[in-house]
Image (tube, rainbow, N blue to C red):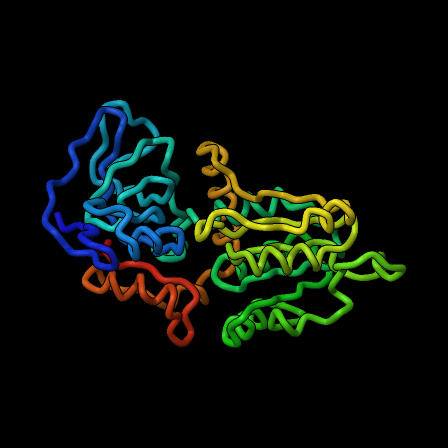
Amino acid sequence: MKACVLSEPGHIEIKEMPVPVLEADEMLIRMLVCGTCLSEYPDWKEGLSIGKVMGHEPVGIVEKVGSRITKFKEGDRVTGLFKGGFAEYTVSKEELAIPVPEALTDEEAIGEPWSCLVSGAERTDLKIGDTAAVIGCGYMGLGFMQLLRLKGAGKVIAIDVRRESLEHAKMFGADEVYFPDEVPEKYIVDEWNDKMFVKGVDVAVEVTGGAPGLELAGKMVRPHGVLSIVGYHQSGGRREIDMKLWNWKAITVINAHERREREQMEYMKKALAMFEHKKIDVKPYMKYGFPMEEINEAFRAMKEKPEGYIKGYIRIGGR
């Protein structure tokens, strides 16, 4: 089979590899598409996974089942939490796969990132009518913004450093959009005064994964409001926060991530149901599909963001 193997920092090669051998509790998956994710960008750029096949946003068809598999059969289309998606074949445990609704296209069925978003939205304590600010309007920020709307947000404010990202935010329903240095003073609570209880937002959602975004979110949340951390803080690791400010405002800080696989799978099922029933339309996100031969271009696109880019994926096989 063909597989995309990281051979050196910033470069993936397509190599011939053996088709995985099944264990009794595994399924052989013939891959259709696999999403690209910024969480894998450092691995690619810095060569942290040399010799490995990456890809954790898979959609494929069950090609063969082990003797202990009871819930799936050959020909079923699945997505899930199985890994090694940048190859023609990979394997999955039964509990790490869910069926794909027939109404969804292959790229619409990429469920893994939405398991993260749905879990984060459920953890984030937003009440009907609340004002929410989303800092970072890439794929994850835009998706979270839509989920906040479904939860009943009265106003959604979008903040990003890129003009096109703010245009995307308008397209997905943001009421107000700002560059970070242009956020109105009425949304900033960074000092003790008699106006502090009439300023700020009820919920600030940080989706940048960077120190400036986290700092801004901490300033925007009102006293006794909610700060939800959705961004993946991988670059740099440690963050300096104004703990005096956070203490003083008595805010609730939420790490919006879920690490238990069973729970992640349940959130993924909820996401696919929302797609199937048109609660969320993911088609506008999925404009950049790349063939396997252009996987390095796909990784570069995550940072360079060509015109209209929101989310990328690799086309691997057909049905």
70 shown above or below 270: above
In the picture, measured across the screen, residue 42 lies left or right of residue 14, that is: right
The residue that appears at 40% across and 62% down in the rendered structure is: 311
Q: Position of residue 136 (x, y in %)?
A: 55, 62
197 vs 91, nearest the viewer: 197
The residue that appears at 30% across and 57% down in the rendered structure is: 45
60 shown above or below 298: above
Q: Position of residue 32 (x, y in %)?
A: 26, 52
229 shown above or below 171: above
In the picture, measured across the screen, residue 177 lies left or right of residue 288, that is: right
147 vs 299, nearest the viewer: 299
Which image quadrant is residue 81 in? Answer: top left
Residue extending furthest right? 194
Which image quadrant is residue 84 in? Answer: top left
Which image quadrant is residue 166 in? Answer: bottom right
50 vs 53, nearest the viewer: 50
Q: Position of residue 292 (x, y in %)?
A: 21, 59
The residue that appears at 74% across and 63% down in the rendered structure is: 188
The residue that appears at 40% across and 51% down in the rendered structure is: 39
In the picture, measured across the screen, residue 17 lies left or right of residue 290, that is: left
Query: How many numbered discs, if any?
Result: 0
Q: Position of residue 124 (x, y in %)?
A: 64, 46
